[in-house]
Structures are given as C-alpha cells and as structure tokens.
Image (cartoon, grey):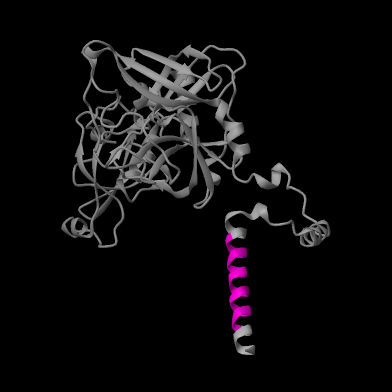
Amino acid sequence: MLKRLWLIFAQAVTVALALLFVVATLKPQWLPPARGRDAALAATASQIALPPSPSASVVRAGFAQAARIASPAVVSITASKAPPQASGRGREPAFGFPGFPGFPFGPRSRSGPQLGLGSGVIISADGVLLTNNHVIEGASDIEVQLSDGRQAQATLVGTDPETDVAVLKIALPSLPVIPLGDAASLAVGDAVLAIGNPFNVGQTVTSGIVSALGRSQLGINTFENFIQTDAAINPGNSGGALVDADGRLVGINTAIFSRSGGSLGIGFAIPVDVARQVAAALLRDGVVARGWIGVQTRELTPELAEALKLDASAKGVLIGGVVANAPAAQAGVKPGDVLTRVGAHAVATPAELLASVAALKPDSRVEVAVQRAGKAMSFQLVVAQRPRPQRQAEDE
C-alpha cells in the first residue's frame, strides 16, 4: 500500500515539474514575479561601482591629429590632354605610377579629352604645389580641387622628369600649407601616412611604416633615393603626401610595385628634401641645372677588372663610351678607363658617379681620376649642363 502511494506521489511531482517547465518556457508571464529574487539582485547591483566612461582622448588612438594637420593641404589634380596628342608611353610592367597605370592619361577617347587623376601638396601660402611630373606631363589643362571643395586652374612652374617632380601654382586666398619634415631623420619602422585621392573616391588616408630607405636602381627615375612604405598607395595617389606621425611632409608618393595596378604593400615616395631642392631650383631658374661630363658607364666586376689588368679589389666605374665633343672627351677620357674619383669624391658605382657629377655646377672645373691599363691618370675638365633627358639616355 505504501509503495503504491509513493509511486503516485512521485508521478504527480514529475508531472507538476514538467508542467512548470513548459509554462516557464512558453508562457512565463503566467508565473508570479519572484520579488524576493529581484530585490536581492537590485540590492547587489546598487553595491557595484561601475567605472566612468573614458574620455575621447583615451578611447581614440591612432594618427587623427597628424591627418588633421596634413589633409587640408593635400589636393586632387585632374590633368587633361586632347586625344590627337595622346601618348601610349608606358613603364616597366612590374612598376606602376599610382596615378596612371600603364600610361600618363586614362583610356583614349574619340570624342573628348583624356583625363589623368593624381594628387598634390600645397607647400606655401602663395599657392605653390608639389606633385609628380608624370601626373601632369603633356597636359593642356590642369585643375586642382582642395579638400574644402574649392577649385582652381593651375599654372605649371616647371618639371624635373629625372626626379619625377613638378611644381604648380594656384591663386586662391587663405590656402592651407603642410608643414615640411626632414626625410633624413626617418628610420625604418617609423609610422607614416599616405594621403591622396585613390581611384578618385575622394581624399583618403592610409597608414603604414617606413619599410626601407634609400631605394635605388629600380629603373623608375634617373635619380632614385626612394622612401619605401607599406602604407597603401593606389591609382590616384601619385603626387600625394607621405607624412610622419606629427603630420609633417616627408615624401611625395610616386610609384608602386604591382602586377595588378593596385597596392601590394610596396610603395615608393620621393624624399621631401629632394623635392624641396628641385622646387627651389624650378621656382628660381625654371630648370634644374645639373653637371654633365658625357660618359656612358658600366659596373666594374672582378672579371672586367682582371681583363683590364687591374687588381681584383679595384674600385671604380668602367667607362663604356664617351660622347663626342663632351667635356670628358675633350679632356682625354677614353672608353675602357676606370673612373675612380670626381673632385674629392671617390666613386665605386655608376649611381655614385651619376650623383657626384650631377651635383657639380655647370661651367665649373673639376679633376677626375682614372685607371688606364693599370696606370693612374687624372684629367681636368669643364663641366657642362646636363641636357634635357631623352627617355632612353643613361649617360652621365
């Protein structure tokens, strides 16, 4: 009898619990409020001291201040050129100009002008802008748009194709000016921002670090001393600003390594020191005057040194050719000579010789030292002005 009563009680409790579970799940509002429990939870919550919301300066990290300083002085540039004068000139496919992949201006049009899009940077309150030569090369009309929406026609002050720097000028009041930094103080790993108008979507800021310094022998420009960065640089960024964490201009974005036309994290910028020197010369003289002696060079390898009866450890630059009637030819330099010194500067590579000669003032006199058949010789020559570059010429 007791066993039967216990079985009935157990079944009743089980059914009651099942019903309670179903009601609590499907119709919780049918159940009376658990006042004691809610009061206990409220009392516990009132005893917990929640921290105050952090201030905006704590929440916001990054480079907002640097972008705020630099962005107003970065402009968008639209360069147009009539179709009959269009040029299909390109560059090495692995390297691209992030303003005009493949050729300076966009796809050819039969009915209207070709348009090229790039960026620029205002460096003085009287309207002087820096950009890339390839952004405006051959353009018949150049329009500049500021970040505040104002627009102006730009006049071309001058260009220097060998560094890919161009100087423009606009006439507008109250222009924002970017502070200039010091590219020589940069170190690998420093944070930088790239500011420009990629893909014509509007002004855009990307961040990264300095990946390398002094990049050269890339075949992009004649004179190369690039800052390499992984900050995204895309079509339309050409001529835009590379700035440091303080918002100061440290470079002019100029090229990318890409097989697709988009950023792969390898971008190159012209150091602001170089751009500033070129701009000063263009503003003052209209041209950049560089020295030239008229030689064609080759790197001196151990095999060539042995063939020329030089010591295997000899340093210098092999003269592969001499331009007729150029300063070097007039002084007596001959093909096969190994040039070792220009003035007080020893040279060991063609790039060093190019830089040393270019730094000389036209019409100045300089002594060059050579090795000829193992014999040391020196020549006095009068430096000429480097001629306007022909696209395929590589002589110093």
Q: Name the outermost residue toward the left.
A: 307
Number of marks present in the image shown? 0
Q: Is residue 339 left or right of residue 248?
A: left
Q: Which of 162/82 is in front? A: 82
User: Horizontal and vertical percent for residue 188?
Assistant: 49, 52
Check the image and report above or below for 371 versus 96: below
Q: Is residue 302 left or right of residue 264?
A: left
Q: Residue at x 48, y 20 (%)?
A: 283
Using the rendered image of the protein, determine whether residue 119 is visible from the camera's viewpoint.
yes
User: Horizontal and vertical percent for residue 88?
Assistant: 21, 25
Check the image and report above or below for 174 versus 391: above
Find the magenta span and give its range: 7-22
User: Horizontal and vertical percent for residue 396?
Assistant: 29, 36
Classified by dominant secondary structure, the portion drawn in magenta counts as helix
Q: Name the outermost residue toward the front.
A: 1
Q: Is residue 54 left or right of residue 290?
A: right
Q: Residue at x 55, y 30 (%)?
A: 71
Based on the picture, tell me whether residue 16 belongs to the magenta stretch: yes
Q: Which of 146/282 is in front? A: 146
User: Horizontal and vertical percent for residue 214?
Assistant: 42, 46
Q: Is residue 223 left or right of residue 208?
A: left
Using the rendered image of the protein, determine whether residue 247 is visible from the camera's viewpoint.
no
Check the image and report above or below for 267 versus 76: below
